[in-house]
Amino acid sequence: MKAKEETSKKSVRVVIVAEAASLQFGGEAALPLHYYRVLRRRGIPVWLVVREHVRTQLKKLFPDDDNVSIIYTSDSRWHRWLYPLPRWKLTSSLAYPISFLLQSITQLEQRQLIRRLIKIHGINIVHQPTPVSPKAPSYFFGMGVPVIVGPMNGGMDYPAAFRKKESRSHTLIKSFGRKASHFLNVLIPGKRKAAVLLVANARTRKALPKTCKGEVIQLVENGVDTSVWNFAAHDFDGNRHSLTRYVFVGRLVGWKAVDLLLQAFKTASERAHISLTIIGDGRERESLEQLAQDLGVLDTEANQPGKVHFTGWLDQSECAKQLQQHDAMILPSLQECGGAVVLEAMCMCLPVIATNWGGPSDYLDPSCGILVNPSSRKEFLDGLSKAMIKLSLHPELRKAMGKAGQEKVIQEFTWDAKVDTMLEIYRKAISKFC
């Protein structure tokens, strides 16, 4: 094993490129940071190329790496003018083209920078983990070394029974974008010429540009940082009448279906001794709090029987502390490509109730959670309520599911395990390229 790792240290010299690498931004921005963090800790020669706007965060995490192995591309006037706009709740008809324009400007500058780094440092592989969209074009081609893109995750639509939750304009824009992506990926051939394309699931494989020629490998994009989401122990006292504390973590946007969760919770709370904490923020928060108020379940204090408490946004450490105080997670998202919070909850020995659609179904099985089919609105609401009642009335089941989920994460989804797999992919790509 030692000899193998020494070989990997000598043979792999990797640059990771992304628009952002951050734990604060959430979502896919965390992925490149974790690859860099673990590779760096193992002594693998690694460089990280990101935009200037994350410099302050990364300097706190890696004070000795600034401008040495972390290289920043400056924000253009376009970034300064356009980057804040999505925060003003632009419609997707404007947000999508603005996002594509900014990503293109960033990647073009990063492309030139990485070509210089390859010559100076003898880098022999380029890894682009984000954006995770299988349709987004990549500008990293003709680098003189193999390029790995992903893991990607996408190609999702709403379940058939919930298509009306997506506005017609958004549906049309998404359809146009998918059709236009074929032309863009011919014009900008990074994915077509990549040595390896990593996909999270079969759905994403189907969503790849048809012209891609590189090897396609399936690998889930999310992982768990066990230094944050440590293996907390929970008190399962076996008392079926004690309060069961549910928690939701995520952005408060329409496709997360928190409105449906609140309605299902109201029904379940009439038959079980439960509470619900909503961790997160977003444009739907005000309307969701009003809905909870109308349902008679809103409370300003946490863990009150039959009540829902909104905490707002919390950083990772605070979020982890909150999870330690709860008994199960529930994620009713209807368009969740990934769902890292599911793995984080599993790591902390929490059973999970989630929608049997998209990312959560890649992680959960009956041993560690309950997947609810979104076959119709009525059946989905009924399924969520029944799942909450079931786990509340059977604490021994919660305990067994929590342990099974924790074991699954340790075996398959820690960042160290993911980096082990990624190093093998790097080495094979390098050997084939040579």
Image (cartoon, rainbow, N blue to C red):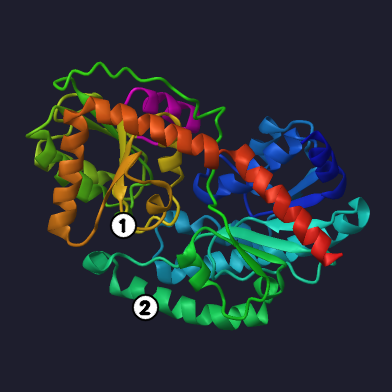
Mark 1 nearby-residue class (10 Å; few <14, some 14–19, many ≥20): many
Q: Left or right of 77: which side holds 117?
A: right
Is residue 406 placed above or below 412 in the rendered structure? above
Residues rendered magenta in the picture: 312-326
Q: Left or right of 252: which side holds 339?
A: right
Q: Amino acid at mark 2?
A: Leu
Q: Left or right of 249: which side holds 420?
A: right
Quadrant of the drawing holding the N terminus: top right
Q: Position of residue 126 (x, y in %)?
A: 76, 58
- The residue lying at 31 percent from left, 65 percent from top is 158
Is residue 58 placed above or below 48 in the rendered structure? above
Whether the magenta-drawn stretch holds residue 316 is answered as yes
Q: In terms of secondary structure, where does tag 1 sit?
A: loop
Q: Which residue is mark 2?
A: 172
Q: Nearer the viewer, mark 2 or mark 1?
A: 1
Q: Which residue is mark 1?
A: 334
Give 81 or 17, whichever is nearer the viewer: 17
What separation in Å lies between label 2 and label 1 (alpha carbons)?
19 Å
Give 225 or 26, whichever is nearer the viewer: 225
Whether the magenta-drawn stretch holds residue 264 is answered as no
Q: In terms of secondary structure, where does tag 2 sit?
A: helix
